[in-house]
Image (spheres, grey):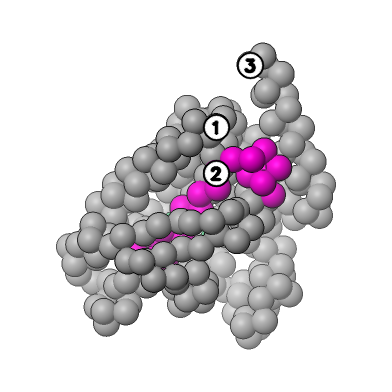
Amino acid sequence: MIIAIDGPSGAGKSTLGKMLAKKLNLLYIDTGAMYRAVALAVLLRGTGFDDEEEVVRFAESSEIELVGEPDALRILLNGRDVSAEIRTMEIAQAASIVSTFSEVRKIMVEHQRTLGEKDSNGCVLEGRDIGSVVFPNADLKFFLTAKPEARAQRRFTEDSRVSSYEQTLAEINERDERDVSRADSPLTIAENSVVIDTSELDLSEVFEQMLAAVRDKQDEVQ
Ligand code: DC
């Protein structure tokens, strides 16, 4: 079973995607981490993001691996564990720039399809374009969303590196704007998605809704 989870940053995709993958014993693929790894590769070389061809070369030549169980997933860039390094606000913004480049997206999408098809049991993929582009025929598509204020509040409460609520909200709005307005594969609700607004729900409530949708799907195919 291939399960797609899309939505804006901070809507709970990662936490819920990992929970779902664990519960269903499926592979978990964090596609945002892959764009983040490319952004880190560019920044480590001291290259900016103005030269698109150069960024594409980094995307082509970087070896990005996702290893380990869903709740202990590690991201390797050219063999080095960069799991913590890619979680900064700077990398988040850089990844959102890198992800506007069509050639970079092509390389990432190909890589994601290969990873997603590797396990015959299927997988849970989380990102922005999974249900619309990477796996448009996914068995189940979720679109998780929440008001920007709710997402900023969560980030602010959960991440000790975040300096202020206002700055977090501004960064979330900036990233949302770029993710929904880019020409190639903008963030949209893919056809047949189960849409869940998580603003007023706690984690277990969202998880129950997602599990119920999975069970319905499983009943349908049996
Ligand atoms: O989910 P995240 O915050 O780790 O994603 C980082 C950036 O990568 C985000 O701004 C949008 C981009 N992204 C994308 O364009 N397509 C994906 N499938 C996943 C992430």
Does label 2 or label 1 sit earlier along the sequence? 2
Residue 53 falls left or right of residue 115? left
Mark identifier at residue 88: none
Residue projecting furthest to the bottom: 163
Does label 2 or label 3 sit earlier along the sequence? 2
Which residue is located at x 71 percent, y 31 percent?
Answer: 213
- Badge 2 vs badge 3, beta-carbon distance below 8 Å: no
Magenta-colored span:
19-38
- Hey, what amino acid is under mark 3? Val
Q: Nearer the viewer, residue 136 or 175?
A: 136
Ligand 1 contact, mark 2 (Cβ < 8 Å): no
Q: Nearer the viewer, residue 43 or 199?
A: 43
Q: Which residue is mark 3?
A: 221
Ligand 1 contact, mark 3 (Cβ < 8 Å): no
Q: Which residue is mark 2?
A: 27
Q: Is residue 125 visible?
A: yes
Q: Secondary structure at mark 3?
A: helix
Q: Position of residue 196 (x, y in %)?
A: 70, 43
- Badge 1 vs badge 3, beta-carbon distance below 8 Å: no
